[in-house]
Image (cartoon, rainbow, N blue to C red):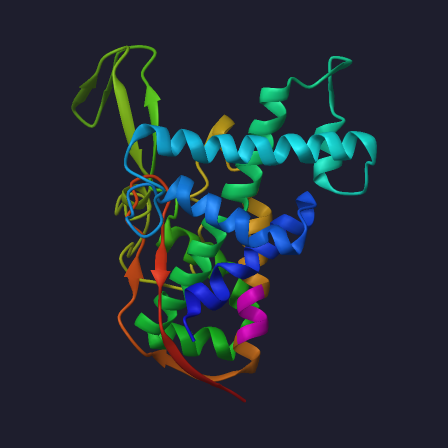
Amino acid sequence: CDFVKDIALLYPLRVIMSIIGVAPDEEGMMLKLTQELFGGQDPQQSRGEEVGAGLAVLRDFCNYFKGVVEDRKQAPTDDLASILANALVDGEPMAELDQISYFIITATAGHDTTSATVGGGMKALLDFPQQFKKLQENLDLCHSAAREMIRWVSPVRHMMRTATEDATFQGQTIHAGENLSLWYPSANRDEAAIERPNEFDVARDNRNQLAFGYGGHMCLGQHLAILEVECFFRELLSRLDWIEMAGEPEWVQAVFVGGLKSMPVRYAFK
């Protein structure tokens, strides 16, 4: 099978869409919109190179979730969509733009980054067969392995920040008003912070990894993401007899959020 297209993309998608309340037959549309949004540099995923193409993707998201909001206002259920649709801020209904923004970030980042970790995590296990064997023989390591996969893949490539005051960092002067690009894959390979950063280690203590960001911008869904990855590999490895590459992996062309686009594998269950 293609481990990414047939498995890694679909599992986190089903989890987050069921939490939001998106019907299973609309998951394919949500996946396509997410790929168009995050894969804007990839000719196989992008809707187009012009600025208007990206805006059109956002417009499609907005139109879809406006309908969801209206539906849940009329007939709320026990899903996240109903909570957002009927939320109050200081006693007043949430502004429409805020509502839709919450829907979009949850519906996209809620599965795309986890999918990238599941796919990239399996590739790491195949690239480091001793770690594969170690994890399969001790599934209690799946929690630490999930965090190591997230560090290793670092699916969010960067964020931009603006300095509010002058500062000097490692001999480099940063002036107030200057823009900074924070590269998470680089931070998660920092030898000053992480021992043997270029080795994949399923037993590593990863409390210092920065794939989820830091401080007030820490990832809202980090605990769900770790749990999904942990549960997935705990269930898969307990059933798997062997697995190997059956072709060359292919990566999404992206500068912001990305991961594997394709990874053919051969496998057998016990």
Q: Is residue 76 magenta?
A: no
Question: How far across and how far down the image is residue 126, in percent?
Answer: 35, 73
Question: How far across and how far down the image is residue 7, in percent?
Answer: 50, 66
What residue appears at the point 39 percent right and 72 percent down from the top-left corner?
131
Question: Is residue 203 left or right of 189 when viewed as pictured?
Answer: right
Question: Is residue 30 left or right of 92 when viewed as pictured?
Answer: left
Q: Is residue 212 visible?
A: yes
Image quarter of the C terminus: bottom right
Would you place residue 267 above or below residue 155 in this image? below
Residue 218 vs residue 260, the one in the foreground: 260
What residue appears at the point 43 percent right and 69 percent down from the top-left corner?
3
Residue 127 vs residue 210, the one in the foreground: 127
Q: Is residue 202 visible?
A: no
In the image, the segment drawn in magenta is: 232-236
What residue appears at the point 44 percent right and 56 percent down from the top-left corner?
117
Question: Is residue 143 left or right of 208 when viewed as pictured?
Answer: right
Would you place residue 148 above or below residue 42 in this image? below
Q: In the rendered image, which quarter is residue 52 located in?
A: top left
Question: How far across and how far down the image is residue 94, in percent?
Answer: 68, 19
